Image (spheres, rainbow, N blue to C red):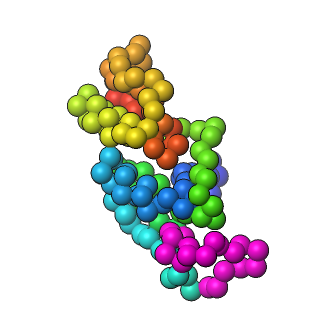
Amino acid sequence: MNTTQSNSLVEPYLFFDGRCEEAIEFYRRALGAEVNMLMRYKDSPEPPQAGSALPPGSENRIMHASLRIGKTTLMVSDGHCGGKPSFQGFALSVTAPTEGQADRWFGALADGGKVQMPLAKTFFSPRFGMVTDRFGVMWMVIMAA
C-alpha cells in the first residue's frame, strides 16, 4: 500500500458565496458544529491576488473556516461573495446514533429548507431521509443499523 494514499484525506469544502457566517451559525444550532478556525478576508496576511477582486464591503466575509461535526471536518468559505451559492451533484451524509438524534438533526436541517425524502424506516436503516437545507446543501440523515 502506498503510504501517501493511506494518510490521504478527502474533506468537503463548501462555498456559501456571501452567506457563510449565517451557515456556520445554522450548523452550530442544527448539528452541534464546532468552529475550529475562522479567518475573514480582512485578516489575510496577503493582499488579494489580481483578478480575484471581491465586491466592496466583503472584507468582513469569511475567507476560510473549519468546522468539526462529530469526527468530520467541514471547511467553508464565502468564496467570491457573489450571493448565489450553488450546491449540485452531491450530498453530505450524517449518521445519527439514535432515532431521536436522527429526528432532531433532520428537523433542524429542514428548517427553512425542503424535504426531499421524509425521514422513515427503510430496508437499510431504521431512520433515513434526505433534505435540502436553507442554503441549498443536500443532506442525507441516516441512523446506523
| Residue at (76, 74) in percent of width and height | 51
- Seen from the viewer's position, the closer of residues 74 and 2 is 74
Residue 73 occupies quadrant: bottom left
Magenta segment, prevailing SS (helix, strand or loop): loop
Image quadrant containing the C terminus: top left
Furthest residue to the right?
51
| Residue at (42, 69) in percent of width and height | 37
x and y, in percent, of residue 96 in the image: 32, 35
Furthest residue to the front?
56
Left or right position of 67 against 49? left
**Highlighted range, magenta:** 46-63
Left or right position of 111 against 7? left
Looking at the picture, does residue 100 appear above or below residue 81? above
x and y, in percent, of residue 115 in the image: 44, 29
Looking at the picture, does residue 74 appear above or below residue 80? above
- Seen from the viewer's position, the closer of residues 16 and 112 is 112
Within the magenta stretch, is there residue 70? no
| Residue at (27, 36) in percent of width and height | 104
| Residue at (36, 39) in percent of width and height | 111
- Seen from the viewer's position, the closer of residues 75 and 88 is 88
- Seen from the viewer's position, the closer of residues 120 and 132 is 132
Count of number-bearing discs: 0
Residue 76 in sight from this viewpoint:
no
